Image (spheres, helix red, strand yellow):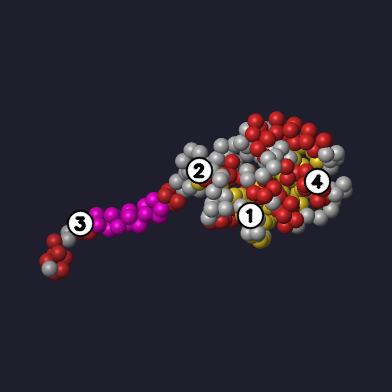
Amino acid sequence: MARTLARTLTPVTVSRLLAAVVGLAVTAPFHAIASAQTPDEPGTYKGRKIADVMSYRGAGWLERASRIEEEDPDALIAALPIEKGMLVVDIGCGSGYHARRLAAAVGPEGTVLCNDIQPQMLRIASELAAREGITNMSTVLGTEDDPKLPEGEVDLMLIVDVYHEFSQPEPMLHAMREALAPDGLIALVEFRLEGRSAAHIKLDHRMSIEQVMKEWIPAGYELVERIDSLPTQHLFLFRAAR
């Protein structure tokens, strides 16, 4: 059978077969690249649905009394590598619930920047801080793709239950990395998708360890530590990849 087939292959047939084989070899990698670079569907990022931004009208919920038991914010602050005199940023600070605690942790010689994209939230945060006599906290109005932070100066950023709402994760991840001081860290806190500890939170407002790593590592970060002692949330400490 092989001998019969060989006799029927004319020079023209052979050249056509070779062209087809070469064509497959050349085009296959391009198909693979195109598949790998398929853009995210609108409203999604790396397979995750981006959650809606919480309105400033929900600021009261951020200050709810039950949050102490649900999240243990004091344990969170205690777990962070904070030192007196640091420049610390609370990204997506909302009502300033954590920023006020950060202000105490860095001391009067330190500074806390309360960062949000809603000016109404920043006004609420400022008012609540003033009531407590806090003087080392100021506000920074960011945008959806840029937190507007000083480049290379931030010692620590805290992002609590808000990263999953970023409508432009990639430019934000880049801008935050650029704002870090040489030894700066980002503390990312998200409600656990795994298990039942955060079952009271909507699914698109929770994140798994796998999803966080899928988004942060390719963006130029490396994991320093993951802390699992909080009641309902993951705590990741990231730094710029070296």
In this view, the mark in front (4 or 2): 4
- The residue under label 2 is which amino acid type? Lys
Chain-order first, disc 2 or disc 3 = 3
Task: In this rendered view, identify the residue nearer to me: 211 or 127.
Answer: 127
Nearest-to-viewer mark from 4 and 1: 1
Where is residue 213 shown, x and y percent of the image?
A: 57, 55
The stretch drawn in magenta includes residue 30: yes
Percent across and percent down for residue 227 are 65, 59
Badge 1 marks a residue whose secondary structure is loop
Instruction: Return the residue at label 3.
Output: 13
Q: Which residue is mark 1?
A: 231
The residue closer to the viewer here, 112 or 29, is: 112
Foreground disc of the pair 1, 2? 1
Which amino acid does the dot numbered 4 rest on?
A: Ala
Q: CA distance from mark 4 to mark 1?
A: 23 Å
Position in image of residue 118 (x %, y %): 67, 33
Q: Amino acid at mark 3?
A: Thr
